[in-house]
Image (spheres, rainbow, N blue to C red):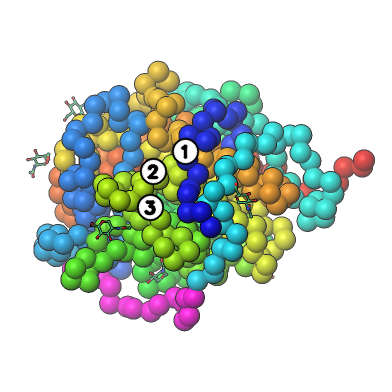
Amino acid sequence: MAPVPTSPSSSSTVSPRLLHSNSSEWNAVVQRNIKTSLLLLLVLSTIFVFSVLYSSRRLGSTAAEEVLTQSPLVWDLDVSSRLVPGEEEQIDELIVPAESKVAPEQSSPSDISLPSANLSSAPTAPTPSTSAEGTGDQSVVGVQVEERCDMSAGKWVREPKGPVYTNLTCPTLPDFKNCQKYGKDPGHLFWRWQTDGCDLPRFSPERFLDVVRGKRLAFIGDSLARNQMESLLCLLSQAETPTDVYRDAFDKFRTWHFAAHNFTLMAMWTEFYAHGVPVLDAEGKPTASFDIHLDRLNTNWTSRLPGLDYAVISGGNWFFRVNYLWEGGRRVGCVNCREANLTDFGIVHAVRRVARAALEAIARCRDCKGSLVTFLRTYTPDHFEHGSWFSGGYCNRTQPLEEGEISLESIGWELRRAQSEEVARVRETTGSRRFGVLDVTKAMMLRADGHPGKHYDKRWVRNASDCLHWCLPGPVDMWNDVLLQRLAQISPPPPPLVR
Ligand SMILES: *[C@@H]1O[C@H](CO)[C@@H](O)[C@H](O)[C@H]1NC(C)=O
Ligand SMILES: *[C@@H]1O[C@H](CO)[C@@H](O)[C@H](O)[C@H]1NC(C)=O
Ligand SMILES: *[C@@H]1O[C@H](CO)[C@@H](O)[C@H](O)[C@H]1NC(C)=O
Ligand SMILES: *[C@@H]1O[C@H](CO)[C@@H](O)[C@H](O)[C@H]1NC(C)=O
Ligand SMILES: *[C@@H]1O[C@H](CO)[C@@H](O)[C@H](O)[C@H]1NC(C)=O
Ligand SMILES: *[C@@H]1O[C@H](CO)[C@@H](O)[C@H](O)[C@H]1NC(C)=O
Ligand SMILES: *[C@@H]1O[C@H](CO)[C@@H](O)[C@H](O)[C@H]1NC(C)=O
């Protein structure tokens, strides 16, 4: 009952690395047709909206060292609902929203409640993942996610071979991530993640498709989840051309099929995992803020869980705006608000809570496959320097940062810790070993050179940089290198151990 969230400081010890990395994201696919142009327009104009929002909110310009410690929003695909008063006109000058088709996904989107979300319980300490083998009950299902190699630790080393695909060999590469087309220095392409304790092999599309034959995998989250999805589509299309089989009216849910391998790849959009609704202004128009109901889940994604074999969740970037936290029908606090009578629980706490809600929802999903394996891809930061989206911020580095240039005391690192602790927690509370972490935070902290920056089509958005999302090809492809290793380890299930 007590609406007192866990304080971030309760998890202050630096946990050993117990993560893995992988993630995914996607967006619209370039299909050389009108839909594509409209979609591009929509997405880029949304960047514009956010840029405006954030440039006015961020606290002045950011020093180069601080850049790595901050991270703002992610663009939304839904332009019309995220404007703050007074900005509609600017947007209308840039775009004509292409939202003609209005077809709500859910006929009855009643929300699931999370009965035992416990605000006062402290996060559990990470469990050593190797010592806690299941006693056999879980292994009936056959899958145990154990990390055989810590792929989160390593360094970027030169890779003369360059990426697995190019903008000429990936038909689904979105224009707004096609950095080479818009003149980005190619230097960022010639690096690979060298893990400290083991090898992370070059991505093999054939191997991946072999591992996921007959399976269904979903990337669930925001635009960075889509970024990974887009990367995976490009990587896999080197072996088999996917078919676009489903897209909802807002392009928030997307399904691709690789027929020769009967592999289904899905993207599911959710900013918060919990139920979030835009806060309305006095005129009833949505503002940039959300009311996040921590004890209710967004059914748009939970209703699509049944049938999945693999889920990759992520999140975090939407918590850098002013949001309000609700529980038990009451507003219990906020994130980033400056209202005297409201408790600001902080970004880390909010991200921890939605990670917990998402993991519990999956653990409790009765209609899901018993063999469903879930990975949480950890947070990745932006790299704006000297400003933000529209306040002159840029990211024009041409090689990875040095280890000494990143801060392991940044909020990004705290978010990673909270997320990985929540995975350890759900493993402990449910006894299930079907949850793992794809820990890409450190690797991506180093890649200030991997964002589009100013290298996208300027017809749609003028004078803005994107230092949050990742170029394709680019360092984000590494998330799928890691995902492949993790999936290969659990599929097919290892033969049961004789005890
Ligand atoms: C909720 O938290 C309280 C205080 O930490 C604890 O006593 C209680 O057992 C918890 N309940 C659940 C369901 O976790
Ligand atoms: C692909 O990238 C090259 C630069 O490497 C660029 O010149 C070309 O226009 C791009 N082509 C497409 C179709 O994006
Ligand atoms: C393809 O995979 C789905 C599960 O994703 C399965 O239900 C279906 O039977 C498979 N089809 C074939 C032809 O193997
Ligand atoms: C669920 O999806 C529909 C259609 O995309 C959207 O209008 C609605 O706002 C979503 N619900 C939540 C809680 O995000
Ligand atoms: C906080 O104060 C404002 C202004 O005094 C008031 O309108 C609002 O209802 C208060 N909120 C809470 C949660 O008490
Ligand atoms: C672009 O943004 C910068 C920083 O806000 C500003 O100084 C400059 O005047 C802008 N340029 C144009 C052409 O709007
Ligand atoms: C990056 O941009 C800044 C500001 O425009 C400029 O001063 C700097 O020289 C640029 N660096 C590179 C490597 O292009």
The residue indicated by pointer 3 is: 333
Residue 213 as seen in the image, left or right of residue 468:
right
The residue indicated by pointer 2 is: 346
Label 1 packing within 10 angstroms: few (<14), some (14-19), many (20+): some
Q: Which is more N-terminal, label 1 or label 3?
A: 1
Of circles 3 and 1, the one toward us is 3
Residue 377 as seen in the image, left or right of residue 180:
right
Q: Which range of residues does the magenta coloring cover?
A: 96-110
Asked if labels 1 and 2 touch by Cβ distance under 8 angstroms, the answer is yes
* Residue 8 badge: 1
Cα separation, mark 2 vs mark 1, equals: 8 Å
Would residue 94 be seen by someone viewing this image from the given angle? no
Q: Determine if the magenta segment contains residue 101.
A: yes
Which three-letter amino acid code belongs to the residue tagged 2? Answer: Gly
Per the image, label 3 sits on a secondary structure element best described as: strand
Per the image, label 2 sits on a secondary structure element best described as: helix
Would residue 425 be seen by someone viewing this image from the given angle? yes
